[in-house]
Amino acid sequence: MFAKESEVPPPGYYDVRDPQFDTYKRGAFLEKAKRFNDEESDAREEPFSSSDKYAALQQKLDHLAKLHEESKTAHAAELARFQKSHLEELSKLRAHADTLEARLRDSKSAATELTDLRARLKRTENERAQLLSKQKDSTDVKALQAKHRQDINERDRRIEQLEKALVKEKRLVADADAKSRAKEDTSKQLRSAEAKLEAQNKNLVSVQAQLTVARDTATSLKTEKTRWEVELQALASEREDAISGLQRTIDDRDATISELHDTLIQHRDLLKTCAQLYAQLHVSYRALTGQQRHAERLHVERLTRRLANAEGQVVELAQMIRQGGTREAGLHAELSDAQMQLSSLTETVADLQEQRNEAQLSRTALTKELSELVHKRRTLEAATDSLRQELNEANARCDMLTRQCDTTDSARDALYDDMDNLTAEIHILRRQHQILQREHEAAAQIHEVASLEHDAAVKELSNERQNARRLNEMLLRRQHSEAGLREEIDTLTRELAEAEGWQGMYNALAEELAGVIARNELAEAEAARLSAANAQILGHHNPSQRIMYVDRIRRELAEVKQDLLAMTLERDALLVSTGELKNELNLYKSVNVPDEIRPRTAITRITKLGSSVTRPPLLSATNDPYI
């Protein structure tokens, strides 16, 4: 993991029996340092408590892993919240720019209305000149003069309104004093006498010039707006680049933290194996003599002296980690500078908005909508105040995030310190394990058991790594699937909005389909009933021959239906013909039939009435209405 190669000599490099093996460490600092205890411990006391030490190391490792996970989750949550707040600020700024564009369009419409008013003034002047040329009598001239006075008064009122609007616009122009004097002179000339039409025309020309100046100011404001928008976009792009750089640095830091976590896991597994071996060796350690234990203790102390050389490397590692922290703090400072630039830019946008509000108020006063624009201005000022408050809140959140980053950095430094201590203890235990393994090669069975346990631990470690890799892959897949699901949700919402128009048609079709299904069920029930009736009619004893005569019966039934239809038609025709014949016969028989309906015959019928003559029984039995 480190580029610098370790300068610590390997195990077995020095001869323990050589008394001059540590002459290279002689010096002022090393000789004055109190490295060893002068008092030797009792031989009966045990030098280490392996179970307690292993439990403490395990607790430290668990605590470090827990702190690391908590810091990662908190950092990810704060980063997501920070990005969300910045996106909300960008959306608000874009909405504000849209409102400014709408106001600029309103100012353009006010300028077009001003041009219409000027055209109307010109038309009235032309009409007045034509009327003066046409009228020759003094009375007509007086009437025209009175009318002209009224027109002049109305024109004066309009000009006063225009002057009030132009006074507000002249605040944005450098030569406001000179133009205000010209306006006052022209107003006095217009009110002084009726015959000063040329002065009035000059005043109108000056008003037109001022309107052109106002147009120029509006165009300049528009160009400034576009320039500010371009600067806003550039700042937004710079802020996005800064955020992306910060995200990259955060990703690099997370990668380094994950690597350190992997190394910690490896060291923890190694500690487990060392603790187990040490426990097994501790069982056999009681059989050794006091002299051997004393020699081994001296050897361990000499090896700890060699371990002091590795502290420089650990210090360099801590310096590299602190340099990464300072680099992250610099990135946070750049982010705060970008936020300050954004706040200053929003203030300039607010100033530009106030200037445009003043220009819009001056233009809309010509169209007699001053009150509405004042109301709009108040609402916009409230919106700017709310935007400033939101920016202040965003700055406060940024400060809070920086403080949290500082706390996480301090926690990270503490974790790194703990990790350094653990690595030192791991190196000590590793050296002890190597020494004891060389000196106790005779214990073959114990070594075999330890090797088997080591293989099992390695397998467990590989399994855990594979599980972690699978979990990472599953997390990536879940993230990709979540992004795909979000896109599908967006498309489905759009399709749902498009399909709402087809909902009524779908409901109607569903109702029709329900009716058709009901009719189909009725038809199926009727078909089942008919099939049951056919089965009862056929009634063959052989089940395979019950359906053989159904086709013939159906054909015969169809033929009978056709014959019945033909017979009904013939019967109806016969009934009609018999009715006609009966009616004609009754007409022949009846006496009270009028001449218009009576049928023509060659026989004249004479009724004979007598006392002995009676009607035949057939005629008396009929229900003819004409008899």
Image (tube, rainbow, N blue to C red):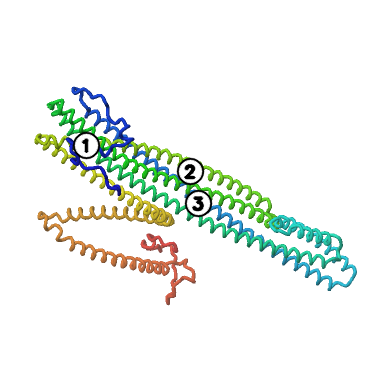
Of mark 1 and mark 3, the one earlier in the sequence is: 1
Q: Residues within 10 Å of mark 1 (few under 14, many from 20)?
A: few
In the image: residue 24, left or right of residue 234? left
What residue did someone put label 3 on?
91
Tell me: residue 434, above or below residue 210.
above
Of mark 2 and mark 3, the one earlier in the sequence is: 3
Between circles 1 and 3, the one closer to the viewer is 1
- In what element is the residue under mark 1? loop
Q: Amino acid at mark 1?
A: Gln
Task: Measuring from the top left, give residue 476's x and y in whole percent.
Answer: 31, 50
Q: What residue is drawn where x is 36% and y is 52%?
A: 483
**Alpha carbons under labels 1 and 2: distance apart:** 61 Å
Classify residue 114 by image quadrant.
Answer: bottom right
Q: In the image shown, does 178 or 190 lie closer to the viewer?
A: 178
Between circles 1 and 2, the one closer to the viewer is 1
What residue did someone put label 2 on?
398
Q: In the image shown, does 316 or 303 lie closer to the viewer?
A: 303
Q: Amino acid at mark 3?
A: Ser
Between circles 2 and 3, the one closer to the viewer is 2
In the image: residue 319, left or right of residue 123? left
Of mark 1 and mark 2, the one earlier in the sequence is: 1
Labels 1 & 3 near each other (Cβ < 8 A): no
Q: In the image shown, does 531 or 32 lie closer to the viewer?
A: 32
Q: Amino acid at mark 2?
A: Cys
Labels 1 & 2 near each other (Cβ < 8 A): no
Residue that extends furthest to the bottom in the rendered view of this protein: 602
Q: What residue is drawn where x is 34% and y is 41%?
A: 315
Task: Measuring from the top left, give residue 269's x and y in whole percent.
Answer: 22, 38
| Quadrant where the C terminus is found in the figure | bottom left
Q: In the image shown, does 182 or 379 lie closer to the viewer?
A: 182
What residue did someone put label 1 on?
20
